Image: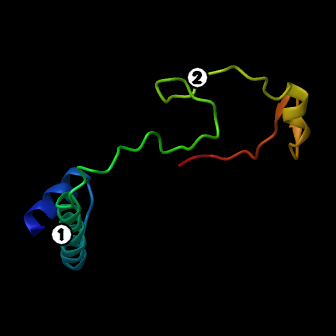
Amino acid sequence: MDLGTIRHVAALAELSLTEEEEARMASEIGRIVAYVKELEAIDTTDVPPTAHVSGDAQPRSGDGWRRDQPVAGLSHDDALSGAPKSDHGGFVVPTFVGS
């Protein structure tokens, strides 16, 4: 990865990098790109595709996605029961002033 690309991406991300950081990023990103190219060279023609990465913990439909099923949540009182402080039916949180 060349320094020009690193500087361009840093400018797009509004990052201020030192020359040392630019050099380190160029080296690290260069190694990542080289590794991805190495992975792309691996023949995967006989490897079956992964059906789903999340496992079989939830019943799935034929398309592999879990169906949205509404489930009961906490009652209002149960939700507030674990709060250190509550008042007027809500959580009490510390007051803060943002800058």
Q: Residue at x 25, y 64 (%)?
A: 16
Q: Position of residue 52 (x, y in %)?
A: 47, 40
Q: Is residue 77 above or below residue 32?
A: above
Q: Secondary structure at mark 1?
A: helix
Q: Residue at x 64, y 35 (%)?
A: 58
Specify whether 48 is left or right of 20: right
The N terminus: image quadrant:
bottom left
Q: Quadrant of residue 95?
A: top right
Specify whether 12 is left or right of 61: left
Does residue 1 appear anywhere in the picture?
Answer: yes
Q: Position of residue 66 (x, y in %)?
A: 57, 28
Q: Secondary structure at mark 2?
A: loop
Q: Position of residue 45 (x, y in %)?
A: 23, 49
- The three-letter code of the residue at mark 2 reads Arg
Residue wearing tag 1: 30
Front in this rendered view, residue 88 or 65: 65
Q: Is residue 42 above or below residue 24?
A: above
Whichever of callouts 2 and 1 sits on the residue coming sooner in the sequence is 1
Q: Is residue 10 above or below residue 27?
A: above
Q: Residue at x 57, y 46 (%)?
A: 98
Q: Quadrant of residue 91?
A: top right
Q: Are marks 2 and 1 in contact (CB under 8 Å)?
A: no
Q: Residue at x 70, y 19 (%)?
A: 70
- The three-letter code of the residue at mark 1 reads Gly
Front in this rendered view, residue 75 or 8: 75
Q: Residues within 10 Å of mark 1 (few under 14, many from 20)?
A: some
Specify whether 39 is left or right of 82: left
Dot label at residue 67: 2
Dot label at residue 85: none
Front in this rendered view, residue 48 or 78: 48
The mark closer to the camera, 2 or 1, is: 2
User: How much space separates mark 2 and mark 1, taking CA atoms?
Assistant: 41 Å
